Image (cartoon, rainbow, N blue to C red):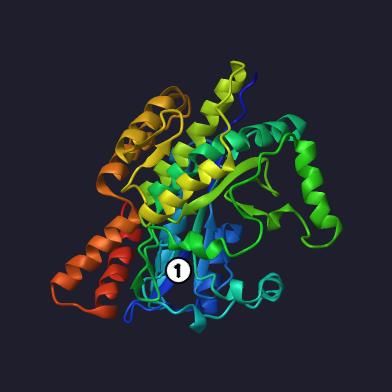
Amino acid sequence: MEAPAFSIGVEEEYLLVDLETLSLAEAPPGLMEACAAELEEQVSPEFLQCQIEIGTKVCATVDEARDDLKRLRSTVAREAKRHGLAPIAASCHPFADWKQQRHTDRDRYHELRRAMGGVAQRLLICGMHVHVGLGEGAGGDALRVDLMPQMSYFLPHLLALSCSSPFWQGRDTGLSSYRLSVFDGLPRTGLPPNVASWADYERMVAVLTDLSIIEDSSKIWWDLRPSHRFPTLESRICDVCPRLEDTLTIAAATQALMRMLWRLKAGNQRWRAYDRFLIAENRWRAQRYGMAEGLIDFGRGEIVPFDELAAEIMALVESDAAALSSLKEIEGLARIASDGNGADRQRRIAEAARAGGAEGEAALGAVVTHLIEEFHVDL
């Protein structure tokens, strides 16, 4: 089998905060105009006026994605600072109230609010999407659907690495990814179904488009989906990562895992497709605990500590990472497993602030300051 390009693209959503109050702030028109003048179509508004979205170009390697993400993050940070604002890459603001936010004045967002009602109003959340190119045409479409149920096994692992939303409206939710709890209120979310073929997938989509329930498959928001716009399989399960290097490690793992699954297929093998019921249990464990309590290894019938799981993934994709020139980034899995994810670090900062005498919103303000600093690490 001829190998696909396994090109990679990363989309990130950021929140804008006021540098003085550390509260959420709406993007002024001048900010979006300045960013668009430099970044063109790689930057856009999001559903809420306090959000901004960026997307890399189609990149051949993770190292190329690093250069582009640095440029995108740096530009947004520089232009935001001119307005007394700063971006943070966290999936929820620690103390903001969703009821005080306004959605962006665009037809698509008016329609989203109309269609989703009160569920859409709570979408004060940000995510990270990773696209992996699997080839154009019928062969690429067939491969996307073939790999989707196999890749679903690893979605909880990717989520656990990325969790960055422990706080919601000034309270510790007890979850590592509260974002997912909010997003799951929308229809057509969650783990993807096991689809037998591309033709079956098209028939599923046609049921909804023919009834004008959705205009196209871009309104299917599964954790993993065939992209509507690009010949990619798109992972959407992850929280956005405060640190650039964590984003790149997770993107590299997503890319390498898909190549590993293709490599199995080329050898007339495949990863076992477990029932969504079982994978959903690991999804919940990752959403609730992040990496702290491990995930279920269904083959072994055991709950395995996450540092061991990270080491297993590194060994599993070693040859693929070598072929993709991403061994350095894949090694970052061990670092995240050891140091913690974004949610772990936020909780440590809040605990330290409280130990120093800060209370309530002041302690969570220290978390926002920390997130601003982490956004600029490695830029």
Tell me if 341 is positioned left or right of 271 in this view: left
| Label 1 crowd (10 A; few <14 / some 14-19 / many >=20) | many
Say which amino acid is labelled 1. Answer: Leu
Quarter of the image for the C terminus: give it. bottom left
Q: Position of residue 342 (x, y in %)?
A: 34, 56
Q: Give the quadrant of residue 347.
A: bottom left
Q: Residue at x 79, y 44 (%)?
A: 202
**Tag 1 secondary structure:** strand
- Between residues 156 and 95, which one lies in front from this camera angle? 156
Q: Taking 317 as reference, is 68 above or below it?
A: below
Q: Residue furthest left?
A: 356
Q: Position of residue 271 (x, y in %)?
A: 55, 27
- Between residues 319 and 99, which one lies in front from this camera angle? 99
Q: Taking 213 as reference, is 98 above or below it?
A: below
Instruction: Say how many tags the image has.
Output: 1
Q: Is residue 13 visible from the viewing direction of this image?
A: no
Quarter of the image for the N terminus: give it. top right
The residue wearing badge 1 is 15
Tell me if 140 is positioned left or right of 104 in this view: right
Q: Residue at x 55, y 22 (%)?
A: 263
Q: Taking 260 as reference, is 89 above or below it?
A: below
Q: Is residue 238 visible from the viewing direction of this image?
A: yes
